[in-house]
Amino acid sequence: MIERYSRKELKDIWSEENKYKIWLAVEIAAAEAMEKFKIIPKGVSSIVKKKGKIKVKRIHDIEARVKHDVIAFLTSITEQAGIKARYLHQGMTSSDVLDTSFNIQLMQSGKIILKDLDKILIVLKRQAKKYKMTPCIGRSHGIHAEPITFGLKLASFYEEFKRNKKRLKDAIENISTCAISGAVGTFANINPKIEVYVAKKLKLRPEPISTQIIPRDRHAHYFTTLGIISGSIERVATEIRHLQRSEVYELQEYFSKDQKGSSAMPHKKNPILSENLTGLARIVRSHVTPALENISLWHERDISHSSVERSIGPDANITLDFALVRLGNLLDKMVVYPKKMLENLNITRGLVFSQEVMLELTKTGMSREKSYRLVQGYAKKSISNHINLIDLLKKDKNVTNRISENKINKIFTYKKHFKNVNYIFNRVFKK
């Protein structure tokens, strides 16, 4: 996590101040429950709530001495709240506080990332409909294939991010659990009703069975989802980078009045934002493997996952949030060149219609193999001699005796390639 790629909302969630505030909220909720069930004297939670303040420096000073963060936190709160604070944490273990709080931070982050996704969906929907019927070439293997529209390309991105939103909702739901079950998760020294109360108070669900920790497959699900979303970001960014290449130049990132592209070459307008997004996506995905490896811990717990989560928790969420906001702005301001798209569509001199010529020949009784060879031969000649494919075909009686000139002319038009665009759009944007 570095300042350059961080937004305040997410930084605040992963600040030490917020972490300790959540710890305190967990302890107070547990104390309220213990008071309710007459396990500790009344008034403990209210005194702690009133007098217990978060003093980050003091907590760190105590931790430097005792080498235990939760003990340091509880000591700091007791210093302020007085003798009654000794009833805090009764029957609980550190993981009860740490895991429940970590899940809350993931929930808080996930909800902001959901808002980021919503903004991207709004932009993609608007841009897809704007360029719904804007012709451009569809490419496979980087080679011209057949005509599509730029709107279809954007609609494909929209549908993918719609899936990402659902994935993230599921991951947030999955991570929204609470464990207040004590050492090794047996509730030996704490009433299970405490966990139920805390979970309801903090808008979580009780973990059905914890060991001494909440099982890490839940966290792996969450971080894997972030990784998938980053893959979608890179897919869009890669497309933009390719389409901005000088020999393609069908679109470009917004370039502000005073922006400079190169320290050496004044003419340069580089796709720096989409290149940056490619890099940020790699960073987010790099956190997926450690999250998966955290699933397998020793027996009822160890702390090999702890150092990993202290890093990937803030880094993955903050980086993805920043990347999504940047992608939304990029898509909103991108400059599209429909004339260049049409120009590129025509550079292969009609080769993009080769499939329909072949199919039309097979309808007349010619074998698929023979029609393929015939059209492929003229396609090669078209490329090597810079002649329009339609002109070559019209000179061959093997073709004109089977397909009328009027039919050939109709084959070499773009309109039919777009006859089902509305059908596809209705499926994607039906809601």
Image: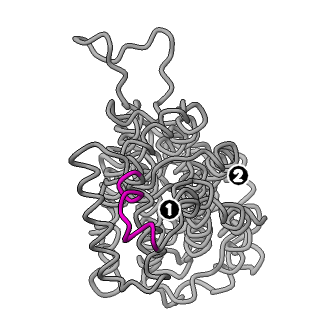
Q: Is residue 306 visible?
A: yes
Image position, residue 18 (x, y; %): 56, 46
**The quarter of the displayed image where residue 361 is located:** bottom left
Give the magenta part as a residue range: 391-401
Residue in the image at 35% along x and 26% along y: 270
Which secondary structure dominates the residues rendered in magenta?
helix
Residue in the image at 34% along x and 18% along y: 261
Q: In the depicted view, which residue is nearer to us: 51 or 341? A: 341
Answer above or below: position of 151 versus 224.
above
Determine crowd level at label 1: few under 14, some 14-19, many 20+ residues with C-alpha closer than 10 A. many
Q: Which residue is mark 2?
A: 49
Q: Which residue is mark 1?
A: 102
Task: Name the image quarter holding the N terminus.
Answer: top left
Q: Amino acid at mark 1?
A: Phe
Residue in the image at 31% along x and 54% along y: 143
Q: In the depicted view, which residue is nearer to us: 316 or 300? A: 316
